[in-house]
Image (spheres, rainbow, N blue to C red):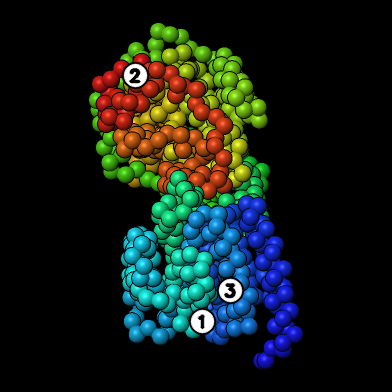
């Protein structure tokens, strides 16, 4: 279709208006996030020394390649229709000149899709192998960038297949079907660097032009990392912009869809407490009945009625629009949480049935052989009777609650928004539990004075603290808990017990007994069988053995109690590898999330945590941390005094 001269002039005039506005915004260090009239959009999160560009094909279908740039902090998506070429060239020139003057150099990288899969003679899985061609100039001074970029691309894995990368050196840095974004003279005049990246579209379905969404997600994540690593090298060596980490080049601005998804997932997560619902309401009566029948009959446990409809919860869960989240790091965290919540809601439906334990294994895992060996070594080497908890008296529920309130008051002075409460509960008799940031204390709890400080740091210094550090973040899920957060939480909490000198031998035996009970549960042993093994083989007193067995067999079988010893062992390994502790307190996270959390911190999506455990500044704690970093293991605790 022909375009009249008046129409063409109108398009140019609109572009001129945009040029002036965009130039002014960039000069004032403002974000540029505009829809371009008719033919695309520009997003520049903040002034940065690079620009990614994608031009949509003039014909054919490609519904997904533009998404490879939309997760970046500086990009333009435009139409490849010739009538828009002049406006696009002027826009790219304006951005390159404005930011090039600011940073001393500027990089333009155009991305496009190469040969489609239906043109490929190879068959699956070979045709799913990621393939890239880097079109690079012959300039020797850009050889280091080219090498960094190609090396970063080779690290990409999609469907467990490594990427193939080829570097093509020459004058062309744009798709063959399009004219260059800038003429050679314009590139020379601006003094900018130009590169092209051709991507094999393994994410496109050749039958209908649709997208393979999981392949696309995997490729986007790897490509984004490679782009940032290469641009980081360019910025550090060629520009005045000196980022401290390649992730700091990522997007800081977060779209509204992120906050909406986070809110909906957090509301579903906060609407139920699986552990509370799966804990018997008649534990004391069950103990009395168990004694009455000579410890030979599995107790009958009663559970609280569900205050919510799990089916409606699942409906809310899957109406959450996670696919609207363009940020790959956040999408990954949200998708994992959605899957875990789905499994936990199913567990609510299965409480007090045989199906409950199967859901528990999916959520909390089973006991690995290495963990079982560690538990048996602890049980064999630690004596069943010690004086570690005796001689110093005991604290009742009200006394311990007063100490917990004083501990919370300490943290409230450092962050006024902390409003945790301590509740002595009639329906929660002998335990301690943090729920929604508040500490619940069973009314009949009896705590050895020698263990009080350790338990305070376990419950308040870890669970309450990470909940409120999560509250300080823009992501609500950091207070509710990311998927699988329990293992790291309990590992941190037990580590705190050790660091303050309260992880004594009875406590270690108890953690080992929980692992043994979980293994027995999964292997099919009955409540009575596990109770007898704990009392007769490992010589636990009957009340302790009953409590351990109840915790593991509650709800139909809860494997969570293996997390305490597993988490402690992993924390020891984490510290042996000289990893920092501070990222672990930012909220309720799992160890596998640390790289994503660090990325979000570099991008300033997350804030510094307001609270730090007060015990970390104690000289004795610093000394114990040093011993852990030097290679100490859990078994070494048997030989060392913990006080």
Mark 2 or 3: the one toward you:
3
Question: Residue, x 52% and y 32% (percent of image)?
Answer: 463
Q: CA distance from mark 1 to mark 3?
A: 12 Å
User: Seen in the image, is 179 located left or right of residue 137?
Assistant: right
Is 350 drawn above or below residue 400 in the view shown?
A: below
Q: Nearer the viewer, residue 202 or 510?
A: 202
Q: CA distance from mark 2 to mark 3?
A: 69 Å
Is the residue under label 3 in contact with that under label 2 (CB below 8 Å)? no
Q: CA distance from mark 2 to mark 1?
A: 71 Å
**Residue 218 location, x and y as percent?**
44, 63
What mark, if any, has residue 110 been given in the picture?
none
**Residue 556 location, x and y as percent?**
48, 43
Which badge, 1 or 3, is on the more N-terminal residue?
3
Image quadrant assignment for residue 632: top left
Q: Nearer the viewer, residue 608 or 169?
A: 169
Is 18 drawn above or below residue 367 in the view shown?
A: below
For label 1, the crowd category at 10 Å Cα-Cα, with few meaning under 14, some 14 to 19 and many 20 or more, is some
Question: Disc 1 designates what residue?
Answer: 178
Mark 2 or 1: the one toward you:
1
Image quadrant assignment for residue 487: top left
**Residue 347 location, x and y as percent?**
53, 49
**Residue 577 location, x and y as percent?**
31, 38
Question: Disc 3 designates what residue?
Answer: 89
Question: Disc 2 designates what residue?
Answer: 642
Under tag 2, what secondary structure?
loop
Question: Residue, x 49% and y 50% (percent of image)?
Answer: 241
């Amino acid at each position: 279709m022909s375009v009249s001269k008046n129409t063409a002039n109108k398009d140019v005039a609109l572009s001129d208006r945009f040029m002036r506005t965009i130039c002014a915004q960039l000069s004032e260090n403002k974000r540029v996030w505009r829809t371009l009239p008719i033919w695309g959009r520009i997003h520049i999160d903040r002034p940065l020394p690079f620009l990614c560009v994608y031009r949509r094909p003039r014909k054919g279908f490609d519904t997904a390649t533009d998404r490879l740039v939309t997760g970046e902090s500086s990009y333009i998506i435009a139409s490849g229709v010739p009538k828009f070429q002049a406006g696009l060239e002027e826009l790219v020139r304006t951005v390159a000149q404005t930011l090039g003057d600011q940073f001393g150099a500027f990089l333009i990288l155009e991305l496009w899709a190469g040969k489609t899969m239906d043109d490929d003679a190879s068959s699956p899985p070979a045709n799913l192998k990621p393939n890239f061609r880097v079109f690079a100039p012959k300039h020797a001074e850009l050889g280091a960038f080219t090498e960094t970029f190609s090396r970063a691309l080779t690290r990409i894995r999609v469907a467990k297949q490594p990427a193939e990368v080829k570097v093509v050196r020459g004058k062309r840095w744009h798709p063959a079907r399009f004219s260059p974004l800038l003429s050679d003279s314009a590139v020379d005049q601006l003094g900018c660097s130009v590169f092209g990246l051709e991507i094999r579209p393994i994410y496109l379905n050749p039958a209908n032009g649709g997208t393979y969404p999981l392949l696309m997600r995997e490729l986007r994540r790897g490509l984004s990392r490679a782009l940032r690593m290469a641009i980081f090298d360019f910025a550090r060596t060629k520009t005045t912009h000196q980022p401290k980490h390649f992730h700091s080049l990522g997007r800081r601005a977060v779209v509204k869809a992120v906050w909406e998804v986070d809110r909906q997932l957090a509301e579903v997560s906060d609407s139920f407490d699986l552990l509370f619902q799966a804990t018997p309401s008649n534990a004391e009566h069950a103990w009395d009945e168990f004694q009455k029948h000579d410890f030979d009959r599995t107790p009958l446990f009663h559970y609280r009625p569900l205050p919510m409809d799990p089916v409606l919860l699942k409906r809310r869960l899957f109406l959450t629009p996670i696919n609207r989240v363009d940020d790959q790091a956040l999408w990954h965290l949200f998708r994992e949480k959605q899957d875990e919540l789905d499994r936990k809601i199913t567990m609510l439906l299965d409480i007090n049935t045989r199906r409950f334990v199967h859901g528990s294994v999916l959520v909390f895992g089973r006991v690995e052989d290495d963990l079982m060996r560690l538990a048996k070594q602890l049980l064999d080497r630690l004596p069943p009777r010690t004086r570690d908890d005796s001689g110093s008296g005991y604290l009742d529920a009200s006394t311990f609650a007063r100490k917990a309130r004083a501990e919370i008051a300490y943290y409230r002075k450092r962050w006024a928004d902390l409003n945790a409460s301590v509740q002595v509960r009639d329906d929660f008799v002998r335990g301690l539990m943090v729920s929604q940031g508040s500490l619940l204390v069973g009314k009949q709890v009896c705590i050895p004075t020698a263990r009080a400080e350790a338990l305070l740091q376990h419950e308040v210094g870890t669970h309450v603290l990470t909940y409120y550090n999560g509250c300080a973040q823009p992501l609500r899920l950091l207070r509710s808990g990311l998927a699988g957060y329990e293992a790291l939480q309990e590992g941190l909490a037990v580590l705190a017990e050790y660091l303050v000198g309260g992880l004594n031998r009875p406590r270690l035996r108890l953690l080992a007994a929980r692992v043994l009970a979980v293994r027995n549960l999964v292997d099919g042993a009955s409540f009575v069988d596990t109770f007898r093994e704990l009392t007769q083989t490992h010589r636990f007193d009957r009340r302790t053995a009953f409590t351990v067995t109840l915790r593991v067999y509650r709800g139909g079988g809860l494997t969570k109690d293996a997390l305490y010893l597993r988490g402690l062992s992993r924390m020891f390994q984490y510290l042996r590898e000289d990893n920092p502790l501070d990222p672990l307190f930012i909220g309720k996270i799992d160890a596998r999330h640390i790289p994503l959390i660090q990325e979000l911190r570099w991008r300033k999506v997350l804030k510094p945590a307001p609270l730090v455990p007060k015990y970390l500044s104690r000289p004795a704690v610093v000394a114990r941390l040093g011993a852990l970093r030097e290679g100490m293991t859990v078994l070494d605790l048997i030989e060392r005094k913990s006080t």
